[in-house]
Image (spheres, rainbow, N blue to C red):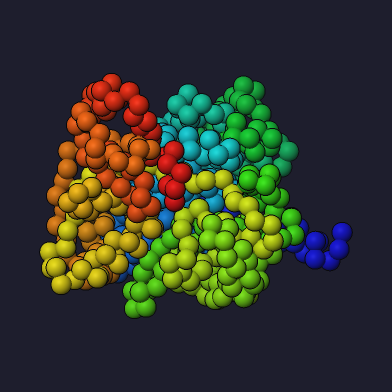
Amino acid sequence: MNLHAEQLKTEIESRRTFAIISHPDAGKTTLTEKLLLFGGAIRLAGSIKGRKTKKYAASDWMEMERQRGISITSSVLQFSYRGYRINILDTPGHQDFSEDTYRTLTAADSALMLIDMAKGVEAQTIKLFEVCRMQNIPIFTFINKLDRQGKEPLDLLDEIEKVLGIGSYPMNWPAGSAPGRHGLYDRHSHELEMHKPGEKPRIISTGKLGVEHSHCKDALDQNSYHKLRDEIGLLDAAGEPFDQKKVENSQLTPVFFGSAISGFGVASFLNEFLRLAPPPGPRKSSAGTIDPTDDPFSGFIFKIQANMNPAHRDRIAFLRICSGKFNRDMTVNHVRAEKKIKLSQPQQFLAQNRSIIEEAYPGDIIGLYDTGSYKIGDTLTEKEAFHFDKLPRFSPELFARVSARDARKYKQFHKGLSQLAEEGAVQVFTTLGAESIILGAVGELQFEVFKYRLSAEYGVEIELERLPYRLARWVKEPEIKKLPNVHGLAAKDKSGNGFIFFESEFWLKLAMEKNHLLDLRPLEQCPSAY
């Protein structure tokens, strides 16, 4: 192996690129902040609850996120820690932004699933878990809010296995009775981590004797000790054994307990997670499997974000590097556009903050300045032209007619409309005939964010008229407005693809019965979805 190949392999092995997923309010943003804090990327962990003190989460860079106290767009957070190069993809928890989350998951090598100890496995967690499983990426679990009253740990494991259909292996185990749990026993290192508010954690080594060691017994009250000993004994005897292969194949999730807000268990979790999580792996493409150690550089665009820096009205395309080494100012093939482009001023991120980089490796996420050249799903490659697998797209379920209140702001309105649509924030259609503009969204909050951003970032106030349609179907016939007996709204997307919007499954079924040659397909099957 030559020097270049050895360096590439070393760099790849040090990368950990993972997404954090959860139901809203499970503590995802708080945990992200603590990981950044322990990793030395920030000095003070912000809280999304701390708006009155003007102390905000670094991952929530958009003004509306800070005002509402929620994450509404995925953000990228990169830092180095103990020889690892970490890329965290912080995703929105709210179901209305599932499409952004799902696309972001395509850029991850593993996922960290947060579960609220009191609420257990919730609806949005189930949906996001299924996407991770479909992509066959390893899933790690952090059961949060250990310092509050919650469900019994054994009941939570049972819930994970029954609701999600995946085996679980607890890496650590709570010691003490809720809500005053004050210890965590690490089953791998055989150490008991004791925690008191305002004090640094105290680590007690129990060696091969484990929970039978007198140090463990002395550190806990009698009831807590006997409960810990009995539960560890039960897990060792009847629990599923740890199997790294099953973890890699999404059949087993390592489970960690802790508290993001107090930091209890977070540092030990981070160390163990980095040890177990996979480095960048192979990717499927039209040219076969692309291995990260393949010499030619390649990557794909999974996210586009406009106006991250409002002062400069810039637009950034997020590129996941899949193979080879990236060098600043390198020239690559833009496969969709069939042209050569020079990649200048590449950036790395800590949410909104960024810096220019000279080189990057598989697993890294870099930002490219975009003047309109990129679309979500674009493949960039140094040599052979191929494309990575298509990114997922959701069919909209909510529709609204949109117009600018001030006709004099036509230019700003259409610029904002185009850029936000290319981000995937909403989907834009134009009706046939009258040519009014229709927005399609997966969730109600997308309309609210769209309206806010047009006003805040483009200076345009809009009117939104909600429409009764609930289904969108791609129709291959070009003259869809001439179709008889179709109770629906005909429109086209920006690429000229024809669509019909229906109010319900009844009207969709009736249209197909009255027009036997009508070929209606889900939006995801449209060839130019991105």
- Depth order, front residue of 396/223: 396
Farthest residue, direction bottom: 311
Horizontal arrangement in the rendering, residue 260 relative to residue 228 (left or right): left
Residue 442 placement: quadrant: top left
- How far across and down, in percent of the image, does residue 263 sit? 47, 54
- Could you tell me which residue is drawn at 21 percent across and 35 percent down? 488
How many discs mark residues in the rendered view?
A: 0
- Please say whether residue 87 is visible from this viewpoint: no
- How far across and down, in percent of the image, does residue 100 sit? 41, 50
Looking at the image, is 237 positioned above or below residue 345? above
- Could you tell me which residue is drawn at 59 percent across and 40 percent down? 138
Horizontal arrangement in the rendering, residue 358 relative to residue 419 (left or right): right
- Could you tell me which residue is drawn at 34 percent across and 56 percent down? 421
- How far across and down, in percent of the image, does residue 417 sit? 28, 61
User: Which quadrant of the figure contains the N terminus?
Assistant: bottom right
- Could you tell me which residue is drawn at 28 percent across and 21 percent down? 513
- Please say whether residue 412 is visible from this viewpoint: yes
Residue 184 placement: quadrant: top right
Horizontal arrangement in the rendering, residue 394 relative to residue 269 (left or right): left
- Depth order, front residue of 299/74: 299
- Depth order, front residue of 344/250: 344
Looking at the image, is 309 positioned above or below residue 295? below
Horizontal arrangement in the rendering, residue 389 relative to residue 303 (left or right): right
- How far across and down, in percent of the image, does residue 168 sit? 56, 31
Looking at the image, is 282 positioned above or below residue 421? above
